[in-house]
Amino acid sequence: MNKIVLLIFLTLLSTTTFAQIKFGPEAGYYMGMQSRKKIITASEKVTENSKPAPGASAGVVADLQLMKNMYLQGGVFYLFENIKYADHVDFTRFGLGSPSQTAYYRIHNFRVPVYLVYKSGFEGTGRFIAGAGPYVSYLFSGSWKADIPVVTYGTDPQKVSGYDYLHKSKDLQFGTDKTDDLKSWDYGAAAFLGYEANVGLYFKANFSYGLGNLSPLNTDVSRVRSWGMGISIGYLFGKDGW
């Protein structure tokens, strides 16, 4: 899937003069999310969704005009996904309530999206823009950090005196081995809505949904799927070729 998307994008660029292509930087806020199947018991499985947490994106965009209002837009982006899982541990049997437990998956990846874009109006005026298309991502680095509540004991080893947090962390491993934490490659679909000013400055609100299973185990009871949303600002240098 990733090779096909890259081949299409590079072929279109190679058959078009650079006078018809605009280039520019784009950066913004990105909130990466995950959903995963969680095994409670041998017969009980639930889907757990991560909680919102801030991340970021930055990259370069190539904007190619195909016809009057239709464009092909691609780019290469760095994404920092700050995936947060949070739930509560039941300590009510000890009279301690339900303290929170949090875990962060901080994932660094490169993403290559390709959009078919519609721009209203014509160049030189402010216009609304909308696009949709596929993307591929390469996850190359990351870390895991968790704060886990554990009961504590006082002088009497048979009596719980309270609770404290156990802090754990490790570097994430990416690949297809069963010992890895996540797969290195992901793919999915993305879309955006925005506004482009007459000077080339633009704003976007974007959404992406992963279609691949990031779990190296790759089974029905071990599935991890990514998705996310964000806002960004960018600037395109150059003029349309039409």
Image: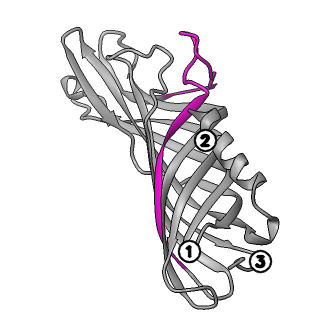
Q: CA distance from mark 2 to mark 3?
A: 25 Å
Identify which residue is drawn at 46% across, 13% down: 217
Tell me: 117 left or right of 170: left
Q: Secondary structure at mark 2?
A: helix
Tell me the element at label 3.
Answer: loop
At a point 68% along the width and 87% down the height, the residue shown is 199
> Would residue 195 appear left or right of 223 to someone viewing this image?
right
The reply to whether dot 3 and dot 1 touch (C-beta < 8 Å) is no
Q: Nearer the viewer, mark 2 or mark 1?
A: 2
2 or 1: tag closer to the N-terminus: 2
User: Which of the two residues, 93 or 196, is positioned nearer the viewer here?
Assistant: 196
Tell me where residue 171 sits by quadrant: top right
Q: Amino acid at mark 2?
A: Val
Instruction: Left or right? Give the position of 50 relative to 241.
Output: left
Q: Is residue 122 above or below residue 95?
A: below
Lower sequence index among marks 2 and 3:
2
In this figure, which residue is indicated by the disc labeled 2?
5
The range drawn in magenta is: 166-195
Query: CA–CA distance between discs 2 and 1?
Result: 25 Å
Q: Which label is found at residue 238?
A: 3
Residue count near mark 3 (Cα–Cα under 10 Å), binned few <14, some 14–19, many ≥20: some
Name the residue tied to disc 1: 203
In the picture, measured across the screen, residue 23 lies left or right of residue 178, that is right
**Residue furthest out toward the right:** 18
Quadrant in which residue 81 is drawn: top right
* Residues at marks 2 and 3 touching, judged by CB atoms closer than 8 Å: no
Q: Amino acid at mark 1?
A: Phe
The answer to whether residue 229 is seen in the rendering is no
Name the amino acid type tagged 3: Gly
Asked if the stretch drawn in magenta spans residue 113, the answer is no
